[in-house]
Each structure stands twice: as structure tokens, then as C-alpha cells.
Amino acid sequence: MHKIQVLNQISAKGLERFQRETYEVASEIGHPDAILLRSHKLSPDEIPPSIKAIARAGAGVNNVPIEYCTEKGLPVFNTPGANANSVKELVLAALLLGSRGITAGIEYVASLSEMQDKDEMSKLLEKEKKRFRGQELNGKSLGIVGLGAIGSMVADAALSLGMKVFGYDPALSVESAWRLSSEVTRMDNLQSLLSKSDYITLHIPVFDSTRNLINQESLKSVKPGAKLLNFARQEIVDESAVIAALDDKALSAYICDFPTPSLIGRDDVILMPHIGASTNEAEENCAIMAADQLKDFLENGNTKNSVNFPNLYLERTQGFRIGVANQNVPKMLGQVLSILADGNINVIDMLNKSRESIAYNLIDVESKPSAEILQAIQDIEGVINVSLF
């Protein structure tokens, strides 16, 4: 029986993936095998020794102590793409809000609550509507920074609206490249994209290399009057630099999902309460994906969409499976195989990959290894943990 500790409200459709016959799921549970969470800020002292894996129902994992988990040999999973359509739709709404006087117009109409004469109201609105004139998106240029699951979907939607789309992503994967429309013009650097774009939208994760990517220096390249959208992560943008660019009219608008006191009350800023993934569908998709990934690891050792382990998937056929996480140093696999050979354990299939400081091995064997053999593998210097699936 596998035990799953849930630290947030998780969609029932995700929790239903854990069969009652083989899984126990609860917010408080003794000796859990895995943790499933959303926004809970997980600290190392909340991770008991029994934990084998952690999954977050969402794309970002800044609320999980990744480095600590890697040191302990615990794969951490996220759900890239599960909420992509939800975010894409909000970005489209932001583009429209930024191009037309929609929010100001709505607020103006709401201010007329005391007016009772509909003819008088009609005449007044006809007179005042020019205050809220905007521009069409058709024919304008959109620069997309980050061309992964969300960025590529935004690109397709913008193209269908008649926009010219520029894209920049120095870490573009082969999978993302195949997904990207040939109508997107790839830019070699951020400065070129900023200089050509009427609208700029950010869809990249937070790394040391992307923190404050939009800053005083990069904003010097921005096309005068451009509008900046941030529905990725707050830390990607140097807020003080954006405010200065708005004050200087280098940017005409900033639309984001990350309100702060410094931004509230500005006519050139539209703020949303971090609702990019706040749809029923996105929450269900993330929960289902996170649950399935935990199950696949606990039952088969596969690490698809792990953010700290190499991405391994080995089709399950027969026999027994050993998972070995170890430091990424030479001769580790040879020592493991030598112990199996000495124990007359025949290897059927295996897969081995590394990622930065950690390596991970899946080894399918013909007969069940004894506790002594597993302990011998665990005792190899550099081995972090050993699991039998």
C-alpha cells in the first residue's frame, strides 16, 4: 500500500487516479511515500525519511526545496503544459485589455450608477466613448520570450488574430521547436525582439539567468510605446526598471499577474490577482498529471517531468525493477552491475542517465534481488538510495 500525503486542496479528478486498493491518500498520514501539493511552501523538515518522491500540481516548483531533495535522492515532479491553455487564454485577454480602453470604459460606466435617464446616458456615452478608443491587434507585432508549451500556444493564437510574431528562446528544446509554427520569426537575441515588438509577453521560468531579465539595460532596446505582459514569474521583471520605463513613456503599459503596492493605482498598469492557472480545467489537468507521474514513479521508477532527476522512462515488461540514484561520478554503474552478477541476478534491460550532479539508473532483472544485494548496492560509496519496484 502506497501512502500519499496531500498538502493542498487537490482536484478530486487527480486524487481519483490513486486506486483505493493500492493507495492511501490523506492530508495527515504516517510514513508517507510521496507528497502531492500545489502552493504549500514545503520546508526540508516537513519531508519525512519515508518520502520517495514529491509532485507539484503546477509548473513552478519554487515552493519546493529542490537542492535538498536532490541531495536526498528524491525526484521532484511538476506538470508542464497542463495549465498552458488556461494561461494562454488569459494572455489573450491581456492583449485585448492592453489594446483597447476596456477596463477604463467599464469603470466609467460603473460610475454612472446614479443616472436614471437612459436616453441621457446614451447621449453621454456616445460623447465620451472616444476617450476609450484603442487599436486592433491585427497587423501588430508580438514578441514572445520563451517558446515552450505556453509560448507556442500564445504564438498560434496571435497568428490567428493577424499579428506578426517574433520569438526568442535560447533554451528551445527539440520538442518545442517541432511544436512551433513556421510563421514565427525566431530572433537571435532579446534586444532584437524588444526593438521590433508592439507587445512583449514573457513565458520563461525563473533561473539565475532569467531573474530580472527585463531590466534597465534590456528596456533600452524596447520599441517606443510597447506594452509588456508578464504572466510567467514576478522575478523575471525588475519592477523598478519597468516603472521608470512607464514614467519615461518607453513602455505604454504593463499588464501582469503579480500585483505589488508600487504598481497599484497607475493608469498604465493592469493587474490581475495571479489567476493565470485559475480555471477548473487547469486545476484538474495539473492534478491528474501530477498524480499519474507519482504513480508511475512509485510503481515503475520512471521520472518523466522530474525537475531535478534525468528524464527516464523504461517500458515495464517482466521481472523486477531496481532504481538506483547516485552521485554523477565514474564507475558507479559498473559497481552496481558487478554486485548483481555476483548474486547471479540476470539483467533483462536497463537505462542510465545523468543530470548535473545526480545520475539515475533503472535496471530490470529476472529474479527478485535479496535484501542483502540491495543493501550491498546501497553501501557503494556515492549511492544515494536504492528502490525495488
Image: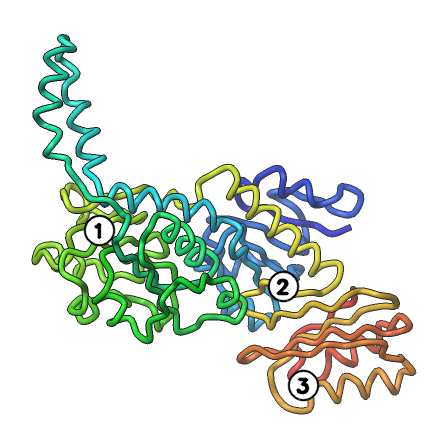
Type of amino acid at the residue the image marks with label 1: Tyr
The answer to whether 331 is drawn above or below residue 226 in the figure is below
The residue sitting at the top extreme is: 117
At x 15%, y 22%, the residue is: 111
The residue sitting at the bottom extreme is: 331
Graded by Cα atoms within 10 Å as few (under 14), some (14 to 19) or many (20 or more), the crowding at tag 2 reads: some
Quarter where residue 201 is shown: bottom left
- In the image, which disc is placed on residue 145? none
Depth check: give the residue in front, 116 or 26: 116
In the image, which is nearer the foreground, mark 2 or mark 3? 2
First in residue order: circle 2 vs circle 1: 1
At x 68%, y 53%, the residue is: 31
Q: Position of residue 206 (x, y in %)?
A: 38, 64
Q: Which residue is mark 1?
A: 254
Looking at the rendered image, the quarter that the C terminus falls into is bottom right
Q: Position of residue 95 (x, y in %)?
A: 29, 46
Q: Which residue is mark 3?
A: 381
In the image, which is nearer the foreground, mark 1 or mark 3? 1
Type of amino acid at the residue the image marks with label 2: Lys
Graded by Cα atoms within 10 Å as few (under 14), some (14 to 19) or many (20 or more), the crowding at tag 3 reads: few
- In the image, which disc is placed on residue 304? 2
Q: Position of residue 138 (x, y in %)?
A: 28, 48
Type of amino acid at the residue the image marks with label 3: Glu
At x 28%, y 42%, the residue is: 96
Depth check: give the residue in front, 11 or 68: 11
Q: CA distance from mark 2 to mark 3?
A: 27 Å
SS for dot 2: loop
